[in-house]
Image (cartoon, helix red, strand yellow):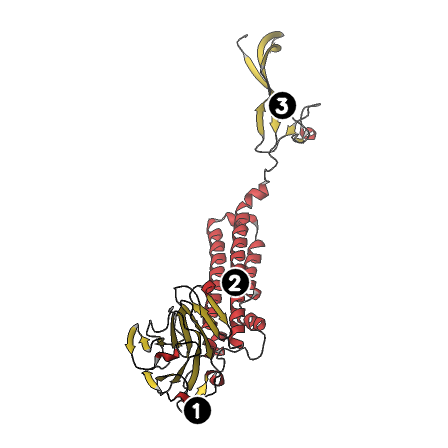
């Protein structure tokens, strides 16, 4: 029948796009079959042509049919994956997620370790630490402090945190510009300025005292707030009395009681330490090792440095070893690496079980979150002056 029509694809393929020859499997002699990989692209390479082709119709008869010849070019997808890779696709995704989690954990660990290394060095050398405020506007050098700008910048010496002792220290003014508050704070102190909460007690530059953000004038001569002026502070932590004096004893200045109830506790924190805040360019020096003879209220008072013992000290070991022992080091990643290696050893098809796949994801995420929480807890305890037994229990 002349209305019959067939179609033949004339496929052109270069050496790169040529599939696998399976001639050895053909049942027809002389036939060369090529098996193309999945996801090949077939592109029309020219105009089709129509030819009349004679074919045997049976019974010795010959019929003519029209055949459409369609030129096609084949392009092999070089990125196609194997069946095994398809089955393991979830595993690949899971491993990529685990890799990202580990990189986040490593960055967090290195950042925490770097900050704590600096902190431990400052505490071991009895230097002031920036507690709050813009670091770019605070010039902290050993026990000297200079503020810049209108915003408050707060520094302190939490490495000198103490309890159950009577201590004494001095603030020497180098530049009386701006405002200044000096006093004591508990380890739970987190405000940007002492005296603004009920965890700290401060003497202001004009002879005022401040606590719980309440301001009262209590009488010391404000002449100390000048270049070369000195403010003396003495705290008896057992009695809870904080005394202040403008200038040194030789000038005939008297001690005045500024606060009572300055005692470590659950709310304030287990220890109390010196703290200073300023703005507007004020510049002072904290004298923590001041000689107390003739200056302190009584002989029972000692200088801050003489009374201090590091409550979290690493007992002579290096800062790096101390942090490594606490787990704030690359060792913290070992637990996550073990989980990651266990998951990598599993077969790809195991990940195609939805329930199992969900369990593996939860295990990886929970491991990362758990380690991060532990690092944060250790860092917080070190900053707040935790004792060795407290750190060992984390």
Secondary element type, mark 1? loop
Give the residue at x 50% y 55%.
Answer: 360
Front in this rendered view, residue 44 or 327: 327
Which residue matches tag 1? 294
Q: Few, some or many C-alpha atoms within 10 Å of disc 2 (few <14, some 14-19, many ≥20)? A: some
Secondary element type, mark 3? strand
Residue 11 disc label? 3
Which residue matches tag 2? 111
Tell me if I can see residue 385 in this picture: no
Q: Is residue 275 above or below residue 38?
A: below
**Residue 394 x %, y %:** 47, 72
Give the residue at x 33% y 78%.
Answer: 207
Q: Is residue 374 above or below residue 220?
A: above
Cα–Cα span, label 1 and label 3: 106 Å
Single out the mark in the foreground, 3 or 2: 2
**Residue 184 x %, y %:** 39, 78
Front in this rendered view, residue 8 or 233: 233
Q: Which of the 4 image quarters holds residue 214?
A: bottom left
Single out the mark in the foreground, 1 or 3: 1
**Residue 393 x %, y %:** 48, 74
Tell me if I can see residue 78 in this picture: yes
């Amino acid at each position: 029948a002349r209305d019959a029509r067939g179609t033949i694809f004339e496929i052109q393929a270069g050496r790169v796009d040529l599939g696998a020859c399976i001639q050895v499997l053909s049942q027809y002699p002389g036939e060369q079959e090529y098996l193309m990989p999945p996801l090949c692209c077939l592109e029309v390479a020219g105009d089709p042509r129509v030819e009349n082709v004679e074919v045997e119709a049976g019974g010795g008869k010959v019929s003519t049919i029209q055949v459409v010849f369609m030129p096609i070019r084949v392009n092999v997808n070089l990125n196609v994956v194997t069946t095994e890779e398809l089955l393991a696709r979830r595993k690949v995704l899971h491993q990529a997620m685990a890799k990202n989690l580990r990189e986040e954990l490593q960055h967090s660990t290195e950042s925490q370790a770097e900050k704590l290394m600096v902190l431990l060095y400052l505490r071991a050398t009895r230097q002031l630490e920036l507690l709050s405020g813009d670091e770019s506007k605070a010039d902290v050098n050993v026990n000297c402090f200079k503020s810049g700008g209108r915003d408050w910048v707060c520094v302190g010496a939490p490495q000198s945190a103490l309890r159950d002792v009577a201590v004494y220290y001095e603030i020497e003014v180098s530049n009386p510009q701006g405002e200044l508050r000096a006093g004591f704070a508990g380890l739970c102190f987190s405000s940007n300025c002492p005296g603004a909460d009920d965890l700290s007690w401060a003497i202001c530059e004009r002879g005022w005292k401040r606590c719980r953000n309440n301001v009262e004038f209590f009488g010391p001569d404000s002449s100390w707030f000048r270049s070369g002026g000195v403010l003396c502070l003495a705290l008896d932590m057992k009695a809870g009395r904080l005394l202040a004096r403008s200038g040194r004893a030789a000038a005939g200045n008297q001690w005045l009681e500024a606060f009572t109830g300055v005692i470590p506790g659950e709310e304030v924190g287990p220890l109390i330490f010196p703290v200073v805040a300023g703005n507007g360019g004020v510049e002072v020096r904290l004298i923590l090792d001041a000689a107390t003879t003739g200056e302190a209220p009584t002989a029972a008072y000692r200088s801050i440095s003489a009374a201090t013992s590091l409550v979290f000290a690493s007992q002579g070991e290096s800062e790096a070893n101390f942090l490594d022992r606490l787990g704030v080091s690359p060792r913290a990643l070992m637990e996550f690496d073990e989980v990651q290696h266990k998951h990598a050893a599993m077969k790809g098809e195991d990940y195609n079980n939805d329930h199992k796949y969900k369990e593996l994801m939860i295990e990886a995420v929970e491991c990362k979150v758990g380690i991060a929480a532990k690092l944060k807890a250790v860092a917080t305890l070190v900053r707040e002056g935790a004792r060795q037994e407290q750190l060992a229990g984390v």
